[in-house]
Image (tube, rainbow, N blue to C red):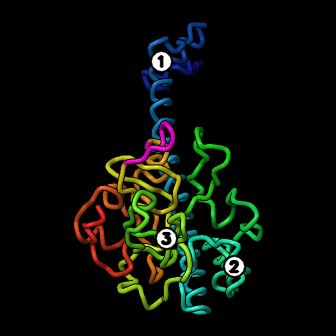
Amino acid sequence: MNCEVIEPLSHFLMPDAASAFRQIKNGRSRAFTLLELLTVVAVIGILAALLLVALGAAKRKAQQTKCINNVRQLGIALQQFLTDYHVYPLAFTSQEIRALSLEYSSGWGTALEATELSGRTPFTADYGSNVSSRGVWLCPSASRPPNFPPSWGDRSYGYNAYGLDQFPWVPSSLLLGLGGTARDADGWITTPALSDSAVVSPGDMMAIGDGFSGNNGVVSEQGGLRRWLVAHDPYPGSTKHAFARHGGKADVVFCDGHVQSPSFKTLFDDDSDAALRRWNRDHLPHRDQL
C-alpha cells in the first residue's frame, strides 16, 4: 500500500517567506530595530516639512490674490467716482469744506464707500465711523503691528494723495498726487480737488495700494501709499513687519484701473525717472523734490 507523503507548508513557500514562516512557527518573529524606527520617523518628518512649506506657499499666494482683488475693487470704485464727479477724491476734508459740494463731502475712503458700487462689492458699510478696516479694506496678509500706537487707524490700503512730496517738512513744495491741489494754513493738503484730466498718464500713475510708506530701505505701514523723502521708522520693527506682508512687495492699482505688484526697492529706493514719475500726476520725475 502506497502512502502519500504530505510536505510541510514551508516547503511550498519562497525561501524568505519560508524563513519568516519558520520564525513565526518557532515564536521568533523579527521586530523592527531602533535604527529602522528612527529612519521611518525621519522620513515622515521630512515629508511633513515639505508639505508644510507647500501649504504655506499656497496660503501666501491665496492671500496675495485676495489683496490684489481688493485693490482692483478700490480701483473700480475710484473710476465710478471719477465718472460721477470728474475729480479725484480729496485726501481728507475739514468741517469747512464738507458742505461745499458732494465731491468734497468726505475723505477718499468714505468717498469710495459712497459710490453705487459699494452695494455689490465687499465694502464695509461703516467704514466712515470705523477705521479698523474690514472687508475690501483689509489685506488678508496684514496684521496690526505690535508697536502701533492705539490712536492710529489700522487700514490696509493707502491713497497716493501727495505724490513725490516733501510734506510736512516743506509746506510750500509741490502737490503732485491725487488728494487735492492746495494746502491749508497748517500745510495740510486740501481743496480744490484734482480734475480727472489733470493726470497726464493714468496708466503710469499709482492711485491706491497697500498702505506702505518708505525710503532708503526703511518701510512703514503708517502714512498711506507714500514715498518718504527722509527715512522714517515710526516704531521698532516696522520694516520687518511690512516686508512679511507680501515678501517685500506692494499691490497697487493705477489710475486707469490695472494692478501691479512692485517691489519695495522699486517704490521707495529707485531714483530712475521711470520709478519717480509713477508718483506724479504730471508724469515728470521731479528730482528737485528729492
- Left/right of residue 67 with respect to residue 214 in the rendered view: right
Q: Which residues are magenta?
A: 231-239
Overall secondary structure of the magenta section:
loop
- Left/right of residue 228 with respect to residue 130 in the rendered view: left
User: What kind of element bears circle 1?
Assistant: helix
Q: Residues within 10 Å of mark 1 (few under 14, many from 20)?
A: few
Q: Which residue is mark 2?
A: 98
Residue at left offset 72%, top offset 67%: 127
Mark number for residue 276? none
Q: Amino acid at mark 3?
A: Ala
Relative to 35, say whether 88 is above or below.
below
- Left/right of residue 145 with respect to residue 123 in the rendered view: left
Labels 2 and 1: the sequence-earlier one: 1
Q: Which residue is mark 3?
A: 161
Instruction: Examine the rendering and report whether any part of residue 120 can be seen.
Output: no
Labels 3 and 2: the sequence-earlier one: 2
Q: Residue 178: x percent and y percent?
A: 48, 76
Label 3 vs label 1, nearer the camera: 3
Q: Amino acid at mark 2?
A: Arg
Q: Which residue is mark 1?
A: 38
Residue at left offset 64%, top offset 67%: 136
User: What kind of element bears circle 2?
Assistant: loop
Q: Amino acid at mark 1?
A: Leu
Q: Could you tell me if the residues under marks 3 and 2 are in contact, i.e. CB atoms within 8 Å?
A: no
User: CA–CA distance between discs 3 and 1?
Assistant: 60 Å
Label 3 vs label 2, nearer the camera: 2
